[in-house]
Image (cartoon, grey):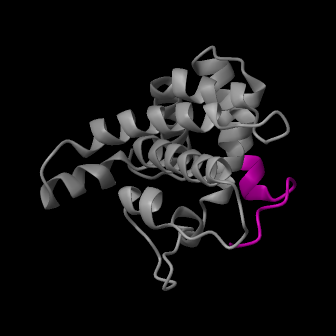
Amino acid sequence: MIEPLRPEHPLRRLFGGTVQHVFYVDMGICDPQIADYLTEMLSTFIHVNDLYPFHDASGKRLRDLAEWVTDTQLTEPLSPAARQRIIHKHIGDFSLFWTGVFPEGLRRLNRLSPGDRLSEFLRQGKQSYSIASELTNPDDRPPARVLQRLSDTFEFCVHGLNLCRKEWGADLNLPG
């Protein structure tokens, strides 16, 4: 895992400011815990190794969501519930990131394999956050209520992240 961005890092401040503006002003969703969570997620996923953090027993990096659930070997000893919480929280994050920030990447995958990847990622993200919330202990971070709100408002979060991306593109004069 790459060192996370410090709170004062300019890129993290950009993510935080954009998320807050889009969610609070443009969408009218004033939920500081969700805004903070999304800022943290975006700050974490700036490096591809953090998008794909899981490995199998041989050390091979796992890239498929189904493999994450079945084949992931975590370095620290955890209860089965804690292991599943970590994996499902990451599947929720991964699904939210791709559907919200890079949905065209999922559309490209549609050409490579049958099925609607975007719909599948939307379904999987909602379900995974819900599972993770059920497996959350009172002292876990984020708390269960945040993960459940992410599940309940998954499509709104996807839309908000898409608006964030458009705002970043406009700031950098990139095509939308």
Q: In the shown orientation, is residue 21 left or right of residue 109?
A: right
Q: Quadrant of residue 129?
A: top right
Residue at 71% in and 17% down: 30
Question: Looking at the image, which is closer to me, 55 or 17?
Answer: 55
Q: Main secondary structure of the magenta part?
A: loop
Q: Quadrant of residue 17?
A: top right
Question: Looking at the image, which is closer to me, 101 or 56?
Answer: 56
User: Which quarter of the figure is the N terminus placed in?
Assistant: bottom right
Residue 95 colored in magenta in the image:
no
Question: Looking at the image, which is closer to me, 118 or 17?
Answer: 118
Residue 4 colored in magenta in the image:
yes
The answer to whether 95 is drawn above or below residue 67 in the figure is above
Residue at the far front in the pictured view = 79
Whether residue 20 can be seen here = no
Q: Quadrant of residue 71?
A: bottom left
Could you say where residue 68 lies in the image, as x and y percent from the top left?
Answer: 46, 60
Could you say where residue 90 lies in the image, as x and y percent from the top left?
Answer: 56, 51
Residue at 70% in and 30% down: 144
Residue at 53% in and 62% down: 51
Question: Looking at the image, which is closer to me, 83 or 53?
Answer: 83
Could you say where residue 164 lies in the image, as x and y percent from the top left?
Answer: 55, 38
User: Which quarter of the figure is the C terminus placed in?
Assistant: top left
Could you say where residue 111 lies in the image, as x and y percent from the top left?
Answer: 13, 56
Residue at 44% in and 71% down: 62
Residue at the far bottom in the pictured view = 58
Magenta span: 1-14
The answer to whether 26 is drawn above or below residue 146 in the figure is above
Q: How many marks?
A: 0
Whether residue 40 can be seen here = yes
